[in-house]
Image (cartoon, rainbow, N blue to C red):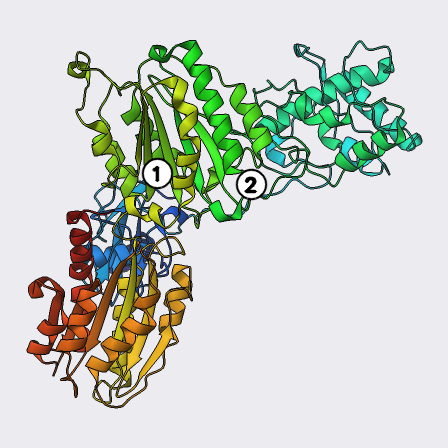
Amino acid sequence: MSFLLKSQGSSSLIMKTTRIITIASALLLTCINATKEATKKNKKSKLYVPQIDCDIKAAKIINPEFIAKCPAGCQDVKYRVYGTDIYASFSSICGAAIHSGTIDKSGGKILVQKVAGQSGYRGSFSNGIRSLSLPRWRESFIVSEGKPKKGVQYPSTLEYSSSKSTPVKGGSLRKDYQTTAAAPLATTPQIAMTTPKPLIMTTAFVSPTPKPTTIPATVTTTVTTKMTTMAAAKPQIGVHKVRDIGSSNVHPAYSSVAAVASRQVQAVQGRTQNQALRGTSSYASNRNIPRPNTGLQRQEPIAAFRKPPNNPTNLAMERDLWKPASSLLDTGFSSKEDLVPKTLEPASHGNPNCKVDVCFLIDGSWSIGKRRFQIQKHFLKDVAQSLDVGVAGPLMGIIQYGDDPSTEFNLKTYSNSKDLKNAIEKILQKGGLSNVGKALSFVNKNFFEDSNGNRGAAPNVAIVLVDGWPTDKVEEASRLARESGINIFFVTIEGPDENEKQNVVEANFVDKAVCRTNGYYSINVPSWFSLHKVVQPLVKRICDSDHLACSKTCLNSADIGFVIDGSSSVGTGNFRTVLQFVANISKEFEISDTDTRIGAVQYTYEQRLEFGFEKHSTKQDVLNAIKRINYWSGGTSTGAAINYAFEQLFSKSKPNKRKIMILITDGRSYDDVQGPATAAHQNGVITYSVGIAWAAQDELEAIATDPDKEHSFFVDEFDSLYRFVPRIIQNICTEFNSQPRN
């Protein structure tokens, strides 16, 4: 019996132990499975890579370092790439990845790292993509294989920047610019919004400007609310112009309100810059925000309205100018440059026959003296008058240089000669050395920006006035400026005598600074007192736009005509490949009426002018026109096509332009090519021949300008045409830079 009881006890213990082990095992398996699932999820989240499109530029993504996946097909020419190895941030990310060899056209994962902006980006042809050159850009990036670095956590979602700015609408500020009051201010905008015609105080204070006074938030709120209530009760009250806070013509209640309101308006304008600010609820801010020096307290813009305050016409004009729907920044000022006020007179249209963007670099060094500095200003005023400045004609800005250059005013500041002359008279001498090289670098990097009024289609002209000689080197800075398309003129006054020439930093600095033009871009004046005699000669040269192409780069001083074989042996698909080749060459040039122009002829037995040099004046229009060319099909009469191209294209080329013919053919011609090609060469046409497949080598050499090796190319397959693009561009530029030009 006792044995049985012991046996039963042992069995029970074994069963309990087994049950515990089973439960423990189940729990352990559950934990292991849960851990595995969590690990899988973690791995999955770590390995998740966001997808980007081919057209996404690095500047669009805020993340400084990220891994992304590119789709297939990003090698298209429309996805622009700028630079080599290090790329400008407005390049296509995926295009740059293909160009660098990180991925191929099928796409893949890449690692992108933002780096600092570069002073220059070198273009190159690599992996089927042609990257473009760029003088400078504010931000760069590099691409590498899409493997995560150890210890670095990459975002699974990319943060994109918004290109749209949030406007400030009728009477309410963005949250970023609102302040918190001690008393609740949430009701203030609502009260202001119910006002039919809110009372708005202008800020035309007479100098000196009163210092800001600290006012408690509660007082500001109360006064502003009272002002709004009074305005709502008496909408017929006219607009008051506060000339002086202590003026007896202004009610005391309005004076204190105006002081607070004007200070707050100026502070908000300084912070929001170009945002449209409307309504009156912005006056309800309770903080005394420090007022930046934005030039908003100048008196001149309202000079036209200084009439007796009871004049109904005056009040009506002021109401129109400051109505709630208007922007408080529509007063002729911008946030940085336009510190000099504009008049309210309508701008002159200017001389349409002289549409150029002109920058004068004036000598402000101490060596010039006060009297000669005044003569220099009189000279500038005479030039401004003679140019007839206006929006449809020439625009003019001024940089004064000494130790360092500074912008007196830019191209968009003045739109008529009268205002320009008044501004010139107010220029004060800076002093210092005559650092012309530094000034030219400043012009190249800063002055001819779109934001400063550069119009793009108008030639850029920089005119340097030098008293004696520069105190630094100018050759390198001038070369970079010319290669950016800036036409540089030098006006030297009272140059060094024989004893002083040993002090000149760079001998023959004028010849090194300007284009080789037999004196066209340089004028020497023996005395400051005879400077007025060169006004008309200088203006005539500035306005001669045909000659201004001389100092431009090889990419913007040619008429390029493509002569395209459309014979039956080419075929539709290959013909589209040829058109892509034509587009790839064309897009490398700066295209406009004053820069490079493009034309095209297609030929078989017959010839057809697809478009002439004068037809399209923008790069995009040219590229669109190339895409629209329809395949013709027929025989191959290359000699007749050369004659036709010369008569229909190059006979209408501008005299100062280089005439470049690029002929593309896939077979031997049915007619003679030697005679037509020789005639074209003798008439100044530089001819490149590009042969594919069955093209005859002897004909290609006969068509090409000597030396043949630099001007004729042959490839077995149409798909390999793209390889010639960089070589042709390089040869065109090398030839341009090696030949003297008038």
Q: Quadrant of the N terminus?
A: bottom left
Q: Is residue 19 above or below residue 453?
A: below
Quarter occupied by residue 704: bottom left
- Separation of marks 1 and 2 at Cα, in angstroms: 32 Å
For this view, does 592 lie left or right of residue 728?
A: right
Q: Residue at x 65, y 24 (%)?
A: 266
For this view, does 14 lie left or right of residue 356?
A: left
For this view, does 343 lie left or right of residue 604?
A: right
Mark 1 or mark 2: name the one nearer the start of the chain: 1
Amino acid type, residue under disc 2 in the picture: Gly
Residue under label 1: 138
- Which label is found at residue 390? 2
Amino acid type, residue under disc 1 in the picture: Arg
SS class, disc 1: loop
Q: Residue at x 51, y 26 (%)?
A: 381
The answer to whether any part of residue 182 appears in the image is: no
Q: Residue at x 37, y 35 (%)?
A: 462
Between 142 and 241, the residue placed more toward the observer is 241
Callout in the foreground (1, 2): 2
Question: Residue 47: x percent and y percent?
Answer: 29, 55
Question: Residue 133: x percent and y percent?
Answer: 26, 49
Quarter occupied by residue 198: top right
SS class, disc 2: loop
Q: Is residue 623 above or below residue 635?
A: above
Question: Residue 645: x percent and y percent?
Answer: 28, 74
How packed is label 1: few (under 14 Cα within 10 Å), some, or many (20 or more)?
few
